Image (spheres, rainbow, N blue to C red):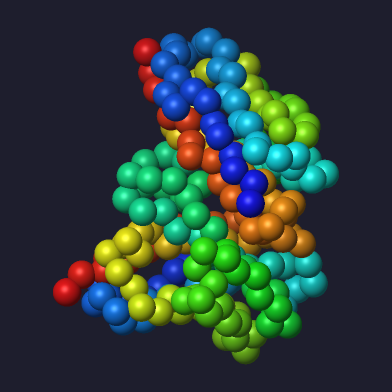
C-alpha cells in the first residue's frame, strides 16, 4: 500500500518561493500508470488541484497557477516536489500530495502540511 | 473550465437516515470521470467513488454514486455516526485536469 509524506517549511515569507517534497513509500514512483499530484486547501475552504507529474517528467498544471508552479520528480529518491513562486497570504493552505492512476481520481493522499505565508 | 456546484451546502440528518448529495457540472463530464471524497476535520480527503459509480477499495456498500453528463449524486443509504463529514465531488476528464466542487457538509441533526 502506497504511503505519501509531505515535508518542507511551515512558514514562508511573502514574495518568496514555497518548496515542498513528497516522499513515496510502499511502491515505486516510476511505476507505469502512476501519476503524482499536489492539491491544496486554504483554512476552512475547499480543495484546489495545483498540478500533477509522471515519472518521465511530463507535467500538468492548473492554468490559474501555472505561471508560478514547478513540479519535479526525483526517481532515485522516490520523491516529487512542488515549488510555488512569488507567494502571498492567499497561498496559505494545507498542501497535500497524492497519487492517481492514469490521471484518474486521487486514491492515496499524504496527511497534508500547513504552509503559512507571513512576514 | 468545468465548474462543479454541490448542493445542499449543509445537510442535517440523523444516524440511520438516508443522505442524498448532489453535484452539478457546468458542462458534460467526459466518460463519467467524476469522483466523490469524504473529508473529516484534520484529515486528508478519502476517495469514496470514482467513475461516477465505482466504489473505491474498502468503501462500505452503503455509499453509492450515480449520474452522468452534468448531474451526479452520492447516496449514503443508512448513515452511521462516522459518516458525518464534508463531501467533495471532483471531475478529472477535462481541462483543467481536475476541478472540485465547493463541498457539502453533512452534520448530525
**Residue B102 position (above or below residue B78):** below
Residue B84 in view of the camera: no
Residue farthest toward the right in the current orientation of the protein:
B31
**Residue B38 position (above or below residue A2):** above
Q: Count the labels in the image.
A: 0
Q: Quadrant of the C terminus of chain B?
A: top left
Image coordinates for residue B98, horizontal then vertical, percent: 63, 54
Image coordinates for residue B91, horizontal then vertical, percent: 66, 46
Residue farthest toward the bottom in the current orientation of the protein:
A76
**Residue A97 position (above or below residue B65):** below
Name the one closer to the observer, B34 or A87: A87
Image coordinates for residue B20, horizontal then vertical, percent: 59, 19
Image coordinates for residue A99, horizontal then vertical, percent: 63, 62
Residue beneath the point at 75% across and 73% down: A31
Name the one closer to the observer, A49 or B41: A49
**Residue A80 position (above or below residue B57):** below
Quadrant of res A76: bottom right
Residue beneath the point at 64% across and 46% down: B2
Please indicate whether residue B44 sits to the left or right of residue A10 in the image. right
Please indicate whether residue B23 sits to the left or right of residue B51 in the image. left
Name the one closer to the observer, A14 or B106: A14
Residue beneath the point at 66% across and 75% down: A59
Residue A102 in view of the camera: yes
Amino acid at each position: 500500500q502506497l504511503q505519501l509524506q509531505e515535508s518542507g517549511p511551515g512558514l514562508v515569507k511573502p514574495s518568496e518561493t514555497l518548496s515542498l517534497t513528497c516522499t513515496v513509500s510502499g511502491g515505486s514512483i516510476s511505476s507505469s500508470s502512476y501519476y503524482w499530484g499536489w492539491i491544496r486547501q486554504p483554512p476552512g475552504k475547499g480543495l484546489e488541484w495545483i498540478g500533477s507529474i509522471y515519472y518521465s517528467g511530463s507535467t500538468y498544471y492548473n492554468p490559474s497557477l501555472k505561471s508560478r508552479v514547478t513540479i519535479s520528480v526525483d526517481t532515485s529518491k522516490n520523491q516529487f516536489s512542488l515549488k510555488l513562486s512569488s507567494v502571498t497570504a492567499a497561498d496559505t493552505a494545507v498542501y497535500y500530495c497524492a497519487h492517481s492512476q492514469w490521471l484518474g481520481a486521487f486514491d492515496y493522499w499524504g496527511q497534508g502540511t500547513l504552509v503559512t505565508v507571513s512576514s | 473550465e468545468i465548474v462543479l456546484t454541490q448542493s445542499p451546502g449543509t445537510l442535517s440528518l440523523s444516524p440511520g437516515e438516508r443522505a442524498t448529495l448532489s453535484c452539478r457540472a457546468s458542462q458534460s463530464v467526459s466518460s463519467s470521470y467524476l469522483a466523490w471524497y469524504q473529508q473529516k476535520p484534520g484529515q486528508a480527503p478519502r476517495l469514496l467513488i470514482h467513475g461516477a459509480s465505482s466504489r473505491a477499495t474498502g468503501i462500505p456498500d452503503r455509499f453509492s454514486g450515480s449520474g452522468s453528463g452534468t448531474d451526479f449524486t452520492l447516496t449514503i443509504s443508512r448513515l452511521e455516526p462516522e459518516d458525518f463529514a464534508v463531501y467533495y465531488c471532483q471531475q478529472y476528464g477535462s481541462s483543467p485536469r481536475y476541478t472540485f466542487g465547493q463541498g457539502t457538509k453533512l452534520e448530525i441533526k
